[in-house]
Image (spheres, rainbow, N blue to C red):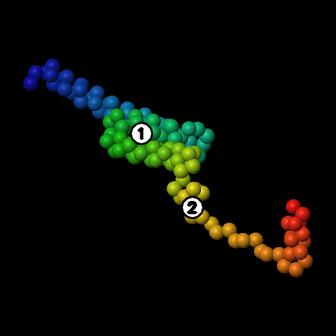
């Protein structure tokens, strides 16, 4: 192996290691800032996935976490859409609920019956 190819190989390995370290530092910092934003004011729900996306450039575990977060966000948005459209599965709508029996009003007796009969005659 020529000395020039050895230098090229060493430079390539150094670049890969430096890139991996830079991605780890920047991505971890962004994720930690996002976690801090969960308590402090700020858009943590945007910053944390962004940090995971940066980490996902070099690490498979970050890509898996990001996919899990995306799936959860989709489920949450679909649930919100169902609530907005009135399709909540937990509480049945009036159209799906069984009919409720309404009892007949009580029959008037005594004086109330005479008044009811007289008003029916006059109407």
How many marks can you see?
2
Secondary structure of residue under mark 2: loop
Q: Quadrant of residue 105?
A: bottom right
Q: Quadrant of residue 66?
A: top left
Q: Nearer the viewer, mark 1 or mark 2?
A: 2
Q: Is residue 16 above or below residue 84?
A: above
Residue at point 61%, 40% (across, down): 41
Q: Which residue corresponds to mark 2?
A: 97
Residue found at the far front of this picture: 121
Badge 2: few (under 14), some or many (20 or more) residues near its Cα, within 10 Å?
A: few
Q: Is residue 10 left or right of residue 68?
A: left
Q: Is residue 4 above or below residue 45?
A: above
Q: Give the distance between the C-alpha atoms of the residues marked 1 and 2, in whole angstroms.
A: 45 Å
Residue found at the far bottom of this picture: 110
Q: Is residue 118 above or below residue 52?
A: below
Badge 1: few (under 14), some or many (20 or more) residues near its Cα, within 10 Å?
A: many
Image location of residue 29, percent across then percent down: 46, 37
- For the residue pair 105 and 34, the one nearer the viewer reads as 105
Residue at point 90%, 69% (across, down): 118
Instruction: Name the quadrant of the C terminus.
Output: bottom right
Q: Quadrant of residue 100?
A: bottom right
Q: Which residue corresponds to mark 1?
A: 52
Image location of residue 79, percent across then percent down: 51, 48
Q: Is residue 15 left or right of residue 107?
A: left
The answer to whether residue 35 is visible is no
The label shown at residue 120 is none
The tag earlier along the polypeptide, 1 or 2, is 1
- For the residue pair 9 and 36, the one nearer the viewer reads as 36
- For the residue pair 123 and 108, the one nearer the viewer reads as 123
Image location of residue 85, percent across then percent down: 56, 45
């Amino acid at each position: 192996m020529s000395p020039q190819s050895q230098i090229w190989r060493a430079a390539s390995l150094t670049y890969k290691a430096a890139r991996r370290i830079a991605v780890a530092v920047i991505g971890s910092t962004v994720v930690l800032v996002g976690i801090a934003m969960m308590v402090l004011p700020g858009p943590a729900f945007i910053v944390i996935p962004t940090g995971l996306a940066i980490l996902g450039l070099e690490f498979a575990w970050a890509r898996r976490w990001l996919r899990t977060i995306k799936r959860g966000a989709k489920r949450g948005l679909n649930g919100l859409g169902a609530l907005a459209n009135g399709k909540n599965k937990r509480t049945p709508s009036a159209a799906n609920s069984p009919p409720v029996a309404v009892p007949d009003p009580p029959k008037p007796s005594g004086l109330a019956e005479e008044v009811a009969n007289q008003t029916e005659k006059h109407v």
